Amino acid sequence: MNLKRWKFVKNAVFAAAILGYGFTLARQGADPTIVFAGTVALLIPLLGIEYGEFAAAWAMIQGGNPPVQSRDDDQR
């Protein structure tokens, strides 16, 4: 299994675990508003990283260069 597939599987497992934990908390009587807010707060960064990697791969497929973050040292 290559690294990109491994990262995708890892993020999918973490996302499923977070959703399952949130669902379990709600079923046990926790405040659904707080559970939803906490679940979303955990999933946005996790899935945002996955989206960033997807966007970079899509740019490479389309023939463009992937977005590269430059440091201040590169500007001098």
Image (cartoon, rainbow, N blue to C red):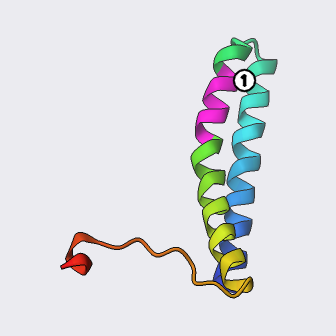
- Classify residue 70 by image quadrant: bottom left
- Image location (x, y in percent) of residue 54: 69, 69
**Observer-nearest residue: 74 or 36?**
74
Q: Residues within 10 Å of mark 1 (few under 14, many from 20)?
A: some
Residue drawn at the location 58% of the way across and 84% of the way down? 65
**Observer-nearest residue: 27 or 75?**
75
Q: Which residues are magenta?
A: 35-42
Q: Quadrant of the N terminus?
A: bottom right
- Classify residue 28 by image quadrant: top right
Identify whether 18 is placed above or below 1: above
Residue drawn at the location 59% of the way across and 34% of the way down? 41
- Image location (x, y in percent) of residue 10: 68, 64
- Classify residue 4 by image quadrant: bottom right
**Observer-nearest residue: 27 or 39?**
39
- Image location (x, y in percent) of residue 21: 72, 35
Judged by its main secondary structure, the magenta piece is helix
Identify whether 63 is placed above or below 51: below
Residue drawn at the location 68% of the way across and 52% of the way down? 14
Residue drawn at the location 77% of the way across and 28% of the way down? 24
Residue type at the position of mark 1:
Leu
- Image location (x, y in percent) of residue 73: 20, 76
**Observer-nearest residue: 44 or 67?**
67
Q: Does residue 75 appear to the left or right of 5 in the view shown?
A: left
Q: Residue 39 magenta-drawn?
A: yes
Q: Residue 3 magenta-drawn?
A: no
Number of dots carrying numbers: 1
Report which residue position mark 1 lands on: 25
Label 1 sits on a secondary structure element that is helix
Q: Quadrant of the C terminus?
A: bottom left
